[in-house]
Amino acid sequence: MADRVRVRFAPSPTGEPHIGNIRSAIFDWLFARHNGGDFIIRIEDTDQARKVDGAVELMLESLKWLGLDWDEGPDVGGDYGPYYQSERLVHYREAARTLLAGGNAYHCFCSPERLSELRKQQQQDGSDVTGYDGKCSSLSEGEAQSRIASGETGVIRFRMPDEGATVGHDTIHGTVSFENRLTDDFVIIKSDGFPTYHLASVVDDHLMEISHVTRAIEWLSSLPRHLQLYKALDWDPPEFAHLPLVLATDRTKLAKRHGATSVLEFREMGMLPSAMLNYLTLLGWSLDDKTEIFSSEELIEHFSLERVSKSDAVFDIEKLNWMNGVHIRDSSPDDLANALSSYWNQYPAAEFLSPPDRDFALKVIPLVHARMKTLTDAAPLLPFFFQDKIEYDSEQLVQKGMDLDGTRVVLNAASEGLTTLDPFDTDSIENMLRPLAKDLDVKVGQLLGALRIATTGLKVSPPIFETIEALGREQTVKSIQDAIDRL
Ligand code: GLU
């Protein structure tokens, strides 16, 4: 194993960052941080046709939101750059030249039509050997060069051994063995001069001194190709770990039709980054099969690839919602105020006239903290903070067992009491109002019921004493006076 742990996350910028992909990034990051190593981001943009503008920015934004940081990458640079594969073509061409010179690769001029015919034929025959049949493998380099000189275009293929097996080791799956006759002579340089994923990732993992490659299980079948490339280039391969799939609850691959699949959609749904990080890490990893709640520091402390499961993980939004609620309840008021105010800034709720600031968030946290599962839940609990005039029907002020006059008396007394109350906080509000009900010979519920409608317009509101403190003396007294006028 290389001396220093260096792990890379290598996304292809082909669309919105899918949580399966992000889960790989999280495992890379946790592994690097646990081992005091480097975490590197490399953009695999060699598939020109599938490139999507803005995808890199969305990817980096998603990772940042989750609290990941990186030592090298497209935005921060580093000693092993550039970190966009499209800017590293010289390296792939040089590797291809070495492979051609050593007889480990050859030019191929077969047309797409021939290849598709070949595929059809193989399907018809039901053969277990699929892929390229090696037609061009006996062309000499001289012949190939003269065809290129005369204007023909083609690809460069790697010459896989026909016999024997390629045996590798995977941290999660143990020894893995692949029959060579089942892997064809695959393309390493495409007709547009760009490398394929296979060549580019091997070359970059080597040049960037990557010690551990952690990637999705779908790449396990490519391992024999990669190991053969390392061998032909006379390079030591890194350690490999192939991560389990992320499935939906119906056990098909998690896709758009199942709901949100991009991390930024979950941010918009009001998830806390700490909960998202916690939940995504548990998609395939566990400490002891029972502990579920981890802070990011705890994840770093405990993470190991050995505890990554071989079996598929199931993404369950209900579980994520539950976990988010736990993280919200575990958050300090300060942290939650930060999260809420930046959430409100980014996604202003319909209730707001303008997005409230952090002081406001801090003030209302006691009213909503225990009742929120997501950050989205807060604003709808607080509409009365954003209404010029509290909205309700005036008959709602009159509580069961009371009449108009009685209600007026009760509201007047409460208003007087609150006008002079000092300090104006939850405890003194409660300590003044409860005995007041007794003095007025009404039930506490009747007094508070009338006050609740007057100050919030809601039959069910956040805890009323806390609510009155948060509204403040001026606003509260004004609303009560207004209620008296409306009676
Ligand atoms: N660009 C590949 C992907 O996005 C990376 C696979 C790997 O990590 O090697 O799936």
Image: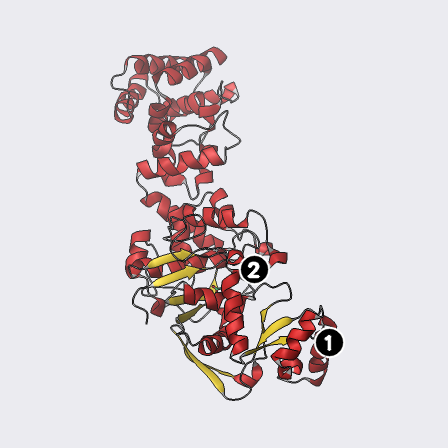
Q: Callout 1: few (<14), some (14-19), or many (20+) C-alpha neighbours within 10 Å?
A: few
**Of the residues under marks 1 and 2, which one precedes in the sequence?**
2
SS state under label 1? helix
Q: Position of residue 63 (x, y in %)?
A: 43, 50
Q: Is residue 211 visible?
A: yes
Q: Residue at x 42, y 65 (%)?
A: 207
Q: Using the image, tell me which numbered label, if any, was put on residue 46.
A: 2
Along the viewing direction, whichever of 409 and 182 lies nearer the viewer: 182
Please name the amino acid that badge 1 sits on: Arg
Q: Quadrant of residue 319?
A: bottom left
Asked if residue 215 lies left or right of residue 155, the reply is left
Task: Please name the amino acid that badge 2 sits on.
Answer: Thr
**How many circles with numbers are drawn on the protein?**
2
Q: Nearer the viewer, residue 267 or 181?
A: 181
Q: CA distance from mark 1 to mark 2?
A: 25 Å
Closer to the camera in the image, 235 or 66: 235
Along the line of sight, the residue nearer the viewer: 340 or 238: 238
Identify the residue position indicated by label 1 in the image. Answer: 114
Q: Quadrant of the N terminus?
A: bottom left
Asked whether residue 216 appears in the rendered view, the answer is: no
Above or below 258: residue 222? below
Q: Residue at position x 52%, y 66% from top?
A: 92
Identity of the residue drawn at 49% across and 27% down:
352
Q: State whether residue 8 is above or below residue 221.
A: above
